[in-house]
Image: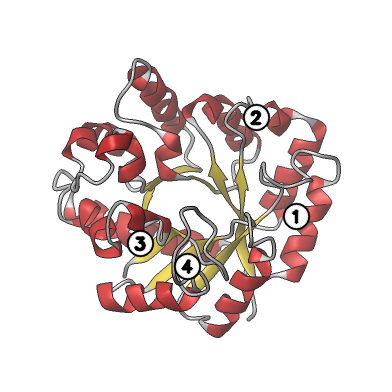
């Protein structure tokens, strides 16, 4: 069983440069086609209401209803590009999202310059309390600098499952790479914090993001794996990843080239772990 923990689907391609097929390039049908071609059984679509897709939660919900046996949705709630980012009423908006869409969880993108201290505010605590009570998975786009606040949330709500996007934004190069990796690894002490094993192309140097299988950053994954083990979940980042590699390569970068992972753990990271988390999460009817 292979379940993709991080992919997207849009009604209109949201990125520059423009593409000749913007209405289909990022569609749910293209995602399903790649899943069929490459033996991926299921996927969690991380909604992102960006640019020409401010109704992306609706679009993804419709896709889940059309492919209920293949897709799950994490709705975009109050991400940094929204007008409601860290404004009063977040807990109610999360409740409304769960009532409106067939979601197993939600995604929340933190602004890079934000210290995430809102997580410890009364509004933030109420927001994550709703998530915990409703058994919603929290899929968080964060950097290593946000991990102290992630740990506070994890400690306060031990029943809340937290999935950190793309290795929590780690990079394999730079003066602060060791400090950042240690900050993320410290969060492995909290059993409800998980890392998405994705984003090889982000971790490499920007001018080498095509260099499959990304041997230069392998050591970062090795150290993170030693700390988190089966609390990691493979993700493709399709269709965004196609700027650096194919959907199949995003799978094989982990499955074939991370040969330091045990067979048992590989099965868990490819889908067993996420499958268990989805099963325990909020039940939905589509």
Cα gap from disc 2 to disc 3, whole angstroms: 30 Å
Earlier sequence position, callout 2 versus callout 3: 2
Q: Where residue 10 sits in the image (x, y, percent)?
A: 55, 67
Viewer-nearest of discs 3 and 1? 1
Residue 26 tag number: 4
Q: Where residue 205 sits in the image (x, y, percent)?
A: 29, 32
Residue 125 appears left or right of 242: right
Query: Is there CB contact under 8 Å for labels 1 and 4?
Result: no
Q: Which residue is mark 3?
A: 272
Earlier sequence position, callout 2 versus callout 4: 4
Secondary structure type for disc 1: helix
Cα gap from disc 1 to disc 2, whole angstroms: 18 Å
Cα gap from disc 1 to disc 4, whole angstroms: 26 Å
Residue 58 appears left or right of 226: right
The 10 Å Cα crowd at callout 2, few under 14, some 14 to 19, many 20 or more, is many
Q: Nearest the camera: 181 or 284? A: 181
Residue at screen point 80% across, 61% down:
96
Q: Which residue is mark 2?
A: 116
């Amino acid at each position: 069983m292979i379940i993709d923990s991080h992919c997207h689907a849009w009604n209109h391609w949201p990125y520059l440069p423009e593409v000749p097929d913007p209405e289909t390039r990022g569609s749910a049908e293209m995602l399903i086609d790649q899943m069929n071609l490459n033996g991926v059984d299921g996927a969690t679509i991380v909604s992102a209401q960006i640019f020409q897709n401010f109704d992306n939660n609706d679009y993804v919900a419709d896709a889940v209803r059309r492919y209920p046996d293949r897709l799950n949705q994490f709705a975009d709630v109050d991400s940094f590009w929204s007008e409601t980012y860290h404004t009063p009423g977040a807990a109610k908006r999360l409740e409304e999202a769960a009532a409106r869409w067939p979601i197993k969880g939600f995604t929340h993108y933190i602004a890079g310059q934000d210290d995430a201290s809102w997580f410890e505010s009364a509004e933030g605590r109420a927001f994550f309390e709703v998530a915990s009570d409703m058994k919603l998975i929290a899929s968080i786009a964060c950097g290593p600098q946000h991990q102290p606040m992630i740990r506070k949330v994890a400690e306060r709500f031990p029943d809340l499952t937290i999935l950190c996007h793309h290795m929590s934004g780690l990079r394999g190069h730079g003066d602060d790479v060791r400090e950042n990796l240690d900050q993320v690894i410290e969060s492995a002490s909290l059993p409800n914090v998980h890392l998405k094993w994705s984003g090889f192309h982000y971790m490499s140097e920007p001018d080498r993001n095509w260099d499959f299988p990304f041997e230069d950053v392998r050591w970062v994954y090795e150290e993170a794996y030693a700390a988190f083990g089966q609390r990691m979940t493979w993700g493709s980042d399709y269709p965004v990843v196609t700027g650096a590699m194919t959907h199949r390569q995003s799978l094989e970068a982990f499955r074939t080239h991370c040969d330091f992972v045990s067979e048992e753990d590989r099965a868990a990271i490819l889908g067993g772990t996420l499958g268990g988390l989805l099963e325990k999460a909020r039940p939905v009817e589509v």
